[in-house]
């Protein structure tokens, strides 16, 4: 949780400080794009390599080294004098954050099982909600109180105390590295192909190609690298070597569909958040602090609902994800209706209400879906499995941030006056609702593809049927409820 607060608070704070930072260092639009999006690019790039290294060599040393690098890069970014220094520091910081988070997911997989794992992932999502909620108000207050020159630099230093606390906690509490099998070797070629595939997928959405032929070239490169990676992994399995991507991660239809649900849900959420921020500031002329106040209910509601989602899962199981996606679709459509119909004076309050609904939906869908996907991941590939899931979400974020913002900006420029931004926001919200509808359909397909577990046969005359609240986990024997707690049979 401390690691999540450290890495997520940094990103949330910087978004509010971008305008003052741009004026202070004289950054161009392309520089700003790389400062903001380069963090996510480097983050996604190291998730799978970081997970693989953690699986093979232990997570504690990697975690602590990554947190230390995150602090050093943050100080370099805050004290940098030009765009080039800031871009380089943010790339290093994003890579360090990705390495930290891949160890976090792997550690949760190693330490927690069954419902405890779901609760741990839910608390991690609570941390994300709290960090996202605190980031914009803190960033706005620092810029307003310290001025444009010093405010954005303090925003970049804000996560350093959190990182130092995280280092101290990690040294004391993280489990020591476990011994690995002697024939476990790092798949260097597979790592290179995976990094190349991730890079060619995300770069075109950060730095838009100049022509259609360039876009086709990027797409062809992605296909070639993906096919080469798949062939290489099969060859390693045939030779008896440990593959980068465990066969169980790609052969399970439930895992593939669950990852696709996470991609559509995550991409829609980030795209909607970006468009809302632009609409409130550029379309309605609200300040950074008022914009943060409108978005605050979403982050707060997601934190609370994530903390309580495991209770809902105990009652209705995987249907929790379906309920959350349905509520999220309704929230996106409600935002579109509100933007078109509510007068300007009441529009911020009405949008805050739709954000509250969206936050509840996110809490019910994100961590339960992650738990369901990671439940099928074998223990020896826990880090890689978590890294692939997060990498898929980062790729979806890059695609959806580019696509949804392009829809908004193109539509807003075509209609003059107040109706332009309103109609553009409604259209972008409709696109996000479509993505959530796709996630809902994929979630239903996953439920249909999941085989029902047979109930335990009765033995003896007075034998009773097995309780309905059986919790099955690959890593441990089934557990069931007895009274108020969970016990091993």
Image (cartoon, rainbow, N blue to C red):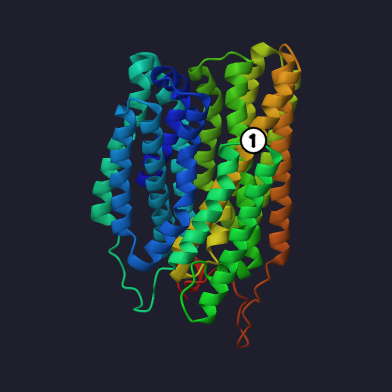
Q: Residue at x 31, y 69 (%)?
A: 178
71 versus 319 height, above or below: above
- Farthest residue in the bottom direction? 460
Q: Residue at position x 75%, y 19% from top?
A: 414
Of 487 and 401, which appears nearest the observer? 401
Q: Is residue 369 visible?
A: yes
Q: Horizontally, is 407 left or right of 273 in the view?
A: right
User: Picture coordinates of residue 330 (x, y %)?
Assistant: 71, 37
Residue 17 sits above or below residue 391 on the image = above
Q: What residue is drawn where x is 73% and y is 27%?
A: 426
The vertical placement of 199 against 243, above or below, is above
SS label for mark 1: loop
- The image shows residue 452 at horizontal and vertical percentages of 68, 71
Q: Which residue is mark 1?
A: 210
Mark 1 is surrounded, within 10 Å at the Cα level, by few (under 14), some (14 to 19) or many (20 or more) other residues, namely few
On screen, residue 212 above or below 427: below
The residue that appears at 49% across and 44% down in the rendered structure is: 41
Q: Position of residue 402 (x, y in %)?
A: 62, 36
The answer to which quarter of the image holds residue 86 is top left
Q: Position of residue 257 (x, y in %)?
A: 66, 59
Nearer to us in this view, 30 or 291 = 30
């Amino acid at each position: 949780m401390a690691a999540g607060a450290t890495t997520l608070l940094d990103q949330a704070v910087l978004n509010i400080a971008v305008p003052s930072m741009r004026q202070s260092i004289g950054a161009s639009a392309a520089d700003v794009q790389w400062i903001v999006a380069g963090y996510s690019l480097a983050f996604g790039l190291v998730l799978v390599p970081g997970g693989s290294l953690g699986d093979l060599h232990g997570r504690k040393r990697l975690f602590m080294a990554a947190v230390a690098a995150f602090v050093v890069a943050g100080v370099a970014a805050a004290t940098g004098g030009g765009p080039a220094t800031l871009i380089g520091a943010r790339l290093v910081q994003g890579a360090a954050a990705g390495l930290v988070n891949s160890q976090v997911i792997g550690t949760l997989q190693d330490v927690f099982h069954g419902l405890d794992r779901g609760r741990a992932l839910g608390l991690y999502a609570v941390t994300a909600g709290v960090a996202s909620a605190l980031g914009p108000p803190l960033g706005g207050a620092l810029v307003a109180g310290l001025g444009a020159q010093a405010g954005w630099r303090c925003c970049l230093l804000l996560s350093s105390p959190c990182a130092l606390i995280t280092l101290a906690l990690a040294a004391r509490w993280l489990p020591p590295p476990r011994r690995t099998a002697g024939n476990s070797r790092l798949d260097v070629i597979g790592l290179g192909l995976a990094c190349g595939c991730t890079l060619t997928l995300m770069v075109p959405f950060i730095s838009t190609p100049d022509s259609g032929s360039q876009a086709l070239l990027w797409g062809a490169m992605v296909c070639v690298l993906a096919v080469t990676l798949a062939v290489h992994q099969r060859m390693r399995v045939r030779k008896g070597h440990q593959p980068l991507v465990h066969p169980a991660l790609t052969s399970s239809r439930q895992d593939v569909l669950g990852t696709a649900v996470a991609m559509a849900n995550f991409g829609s959420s980030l795209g909607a958040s970006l468009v809302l921020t632009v609409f409130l500031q550029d379309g309605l002329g609200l300040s950074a602090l008022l914009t943060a106040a409108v978005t605050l209910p979403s982050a707060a509601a997601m934190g609370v609902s994530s903390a309580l989602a495991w209770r809902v899962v105990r009652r209705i199981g995987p249907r929790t994800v379906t309920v959350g996606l349905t509520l999220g679709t309704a929230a996106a459509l409600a935002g579109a209706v509100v933007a078109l119909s509510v007068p300007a004076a009441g529009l911020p309050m009405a949008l805050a209400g739709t954000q509250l609904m969206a936050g509840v939906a996110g809490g019910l869908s994100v961590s339960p879906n992650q738990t369901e996907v990671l439940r099928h991941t074998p223990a020896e590939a826990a880090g890689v499995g978590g890294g692939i899931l997060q990498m898929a979400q980062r790729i979806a974020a890059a695609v959806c941030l580019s696509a949804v913002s392009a829809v908004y900006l193109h539509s807003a420029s075509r209609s003059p006056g107040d109706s332009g931004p309103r109609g553009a926001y409604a259209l972008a919200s409709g696109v996000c609702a479509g993505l959530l509808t796709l996630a809902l359909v994929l979630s239903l397909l996953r439920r249909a593809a999941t085989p029902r577990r047979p109930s335990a046969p009765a033995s003896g005359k007075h034998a009773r049927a097995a309780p309905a609240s059986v919790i099955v986990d690959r890593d441990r024997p089934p557990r069931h409820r007895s009274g108020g707690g969970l016990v091993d049979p």
